[in-house]
Image (cartoon, rainbow, N blue to C red):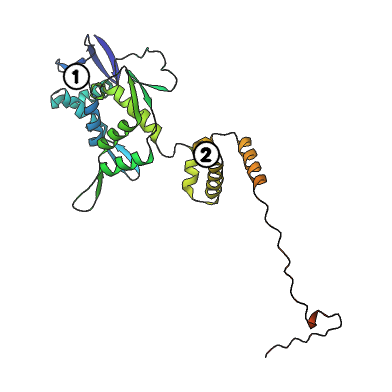
Amino acid sequence: MISIEIDGRAYHLRLGDDSEELEVEASTGEHIRLRRWRFDAHLRALDQHARLGNGELVFDTEGFAGDVLRDSEVPAALFEELMPVALWWASGGAHEDARPPPPRGWVQAGEVQALLRPWTYSERAEALDASVTTREDGSRVLSLEHYLRAMLAASLMELRPATPLERLDGASTAALLGHVVGLNAEGVHPEDRLLQAGNPRARALAGMTLKLCKALGWAPTQIWALPAAEVDRLLTMLRLMEPEAPTPMQVSRPRGLSDHPDAVVIQVEGD
């Protein structure tokens, strides 16, 4: 039996031998068993309790914790008392992370290591189109679960140890989603935020970036990662290699009487 304190409340816990369940002693004296929170349940709960409001993501913590407790068939009368420990358990509580760091190019996601790649523009567009439904009133609703599953399918190249996603626990699921969303998130570079401003500085950055991308065959983020001095050198060399503008040619015309040195030119203007 171990004792922990969460949000100022003390809990007495016992972890199962296989770490698949947690026994919690409630204030009533009952011993409540929480099952391991899994991948599918985690995504369904996110879909239900994460909403976009006023441009910000709003997360219903109590609703999510309620789903964790319902998954273990906890009596509703104990929800308020056990919500903090349910969130702690679903996020990987009672697990000590003593694993060595992952190989280069891999990320640690709870109990597994993952090899990831960014998804492509077409993959994202296809996922977004398939994840949005239109209601009868014309409003559009995004299925976060469907969208995240599509993102994982595109970006997850390999897991070690090889594990079906539905077997991942909540902590590994949350960590994996965090890595994948972070990898594919928009506006992760300061340059992205500058471009979104649409001002003269943004246009100057866009022009410089596209010019170097065309010359080097690189992606914008590769250009932005270069030292400033290297960018200056490249732009200087590109300017030197640009063809010089042709000198305007003097067009000759036949000489007339007005070109004679002794000619008097009279200009007549109307009223």
* Front residue (pair 268, 260): 260
Q: Amino acid at mark 2?
A: Gly
Give above or below for 190 relative to 21. Answer: below
Q: Which mark is residue 217?
A: 2
User: In the rendered view, does 239 fall on the left or right side of 187?
Assistant: right
Rendering coords of residue 254 (x, y %)? 75, 76
Rendering coords of residue 105 (x, y %)? 43, 23
Q: Which mark sits nearer the N-terminus, 2 or 1?
A: 1
Give the quarter of the figure containing the N terminus: top left
| Distance from Cα at disc 2 to Cα at disc 1 | 52 Å
Rendering coords of residue 120 (x, y %)? 38, 38
SS class, disc 1:
strand
Rendering coords of residue 198 (x, y %)? 49, 50
* Front residue (pair 113, 91): 113
Q: Residue at x 30, y 22 (%)?
A: 171
Can the viewer see residue 26 in this picture?
no
- When asked about the image quadrant of residue 260, the answer is bottom right
- Circle 1 crowding by C-alpha within 10 Å: few under 14, some 14–19, many from 20: many
Give above or below for 170 relative to 186. Answer: above
**CB within 8 Å, label 2 to label 1:** no
SS class, disc 2:
loop
Q: Residue furthest front?
A: 254
Can the viewer see residue 146 in this picture?
yes
Determine which residue is flagged by label 1. 35
What is the total number of numbered labels drawn onto the structure image?
2
Give the quarter of the figure containing the C terminus: bottom right
Q: Amino acid at mark 1?
A: Arg
Q: Residue at x 78, y 78 (%)?
A: 255
